[in-house]
Amino acid sequence: MQLQVEISYKQILKIAMPIAASILVPNINFITNNIFLGHLSEQALAIAGITGVYYLVFGVMGFGLSNGLQAVMSRRAGENKTHEIGMLFLQAVRISLALAISGILVTNFIAPVILKYSLHSQQDIEMAISFLRIRIWGLPFLYIYQMRNALLISINQSKYLIIGTVAETAANIFFDYAFIFGHFGFPEMGFNGAAYASIIAEITGLVTIFSVIHFKGISKSTGLFNNKKLNIASTRLILQQSMPIVLQFAISVGSWEFFYILIEHHGTQALAISNIMRNLFGVFGCFAWAFASTSNSMVSNVIGQNLENRVKELIYKITRLGLLFSCSIALLINIFIRYFLSAYGQSDDFIDAAIPVARIISLALIFQSVSTIWLNAVVGTGNSRRNLVVEIVAIFLYSIYVYLVLEHFQLSISIGWMSEWLYWIVIFIPSFWYIQSNNWMGKKI
């Protein structure tokens, strides 16, 4: 198994495309949920925005943990220290399960209090709390699934990512249809049916991909289960690299929840439109996140090969590919946006109101594609703490903007969504400067 990567467009695409597919499939799950819920009622579609972003807060915390783990394992892959990779993976699984238990406790005891003081409608509050108390039980399976992603990407085996995600999507679509509307002999659960369907889908994807890892011999070649003992030094290293990213993502998506609460004050239609925009961002942003993850892994791997002098060359190559994909996607969104929006079963007036927001999102996707690549390159160098500082500054400015626009001046949600432009520009500038400064050279992890 070849662990060291080459600095070429072919190698970048070989790693990034399976990652993009693996990110796309879960986002198709989100869209499937929302299309079914949109046909259920506009209110269900609107509340799915609040609950979806809430779960995403915890989801990205696991993603942050996996990003830090991926940087460490990629460095070991670049150094050809295969025997350490499996041990690092098991330590990360322990951390992720502890994080999942914390998320379950917060959702059951703290989240209801926050939602009661944040949302205006009592019916919305009850729907959201009921849904989240079911949905949060998928968190342990999601976290282990994310650790598995980090493992496969770090050892240059991202081609297997798609297998688990396809199984997850098939299960999600089937059980969404069965549970929400009561088909195939299942009871009609309505809004909460989407929560049960998502949990079953996550379990299905997890079981499938671990079966693949076993039968392909990956668990044996990486010594995945050779050393099951707690390793304090490795656990500390993973936490040092991951916790700043975990906090970074939690703050980022937490601010998005704040944004959605402010949107809810503008009415059900505004909230439903914004929920669809989140779907749009998730699906069409999958290539941006794929190239970002590739940047993290390849930068760390190349540094592990003692090729620090070629890191900038690598990042520029990834950026060019990211821009090519994001500009093409932005063009497609603007041409076919009415067809995409019509899938949610809403009125023409609803679609007309959503189109300007979608055009703003399409430009934000271009900004995102560049910013995430450079931000994750910083993670690959081993300086994840710097990312946290950058995130705090960006979120501070973002939160001031959305509060003034949506709450104080009561401007349109289109102008509110321009906050994404501000956010990604602020993220890019210090990340780009840090890589150009060469201050990362010589850092060991």
Image: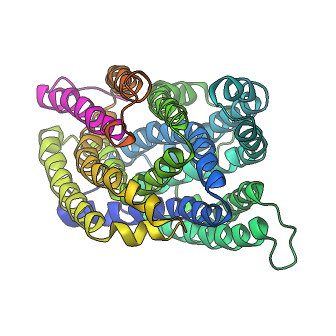
Where is residue 192 drawn, in percent x and y? 76, 54
Q: Residue at x 58, y 65 (%)?
A: 35
Give the extent of the magenta segment.
416-445
Q: Main secondary structure of the magenta part?
A: helix
Q: Check residue 425 for magenta coloring.
A: yes
On screen, residue 37 versus residue 247, left or right, reads: right
Instruction: Report if residue 299 is visible in the image.
Output: yes
Q: Residue at x 37, y 68 (%)?
A: 338
Q: In this picture, is 399 found above or below 322?
A: above
Q: Nearer the viewer, residue 255 or 18?
A: 255
Quadrant assignment, res 286: bottom left
Q: In this picture, is 226 found above or below 99?
A: below
On screen, residue 427 versus residue 87, left or right, reads: left
Where is residue 279 drawn, in percent x and y? 47, 55
Q: Residue at x 34, y 27 (%)?
A: 387
On screen, residue 10 versus residue 167, left or right, reads: left
Q: In this picture, is 44 found above or below 332?
A: above
Where is residue 244 drawn, in percent x and y? 45, 25
How is the rendered protein coloured? rainbow
Q: In this picture, is 430 found above or below 35?
A: above
Instruction: Report if residue 392 is visible in the image.
Output: no
Q: Nearer the viewer, residue 401 or 353?
A: 353
**From the image, which quarter does the N terminus lie in?**
bottom left
Q: Nearer the viewer, residue 345 or 178?
A: 345
**From the image, which quarter does the C terminus lie in?**
top left
Q: Nearer the viewer, residue 283 or 65?
A: 283
Where is residue 144 drawn, in percent x and y? 63, 48
Q: Check residue 102 for magenta coloring.
A: no
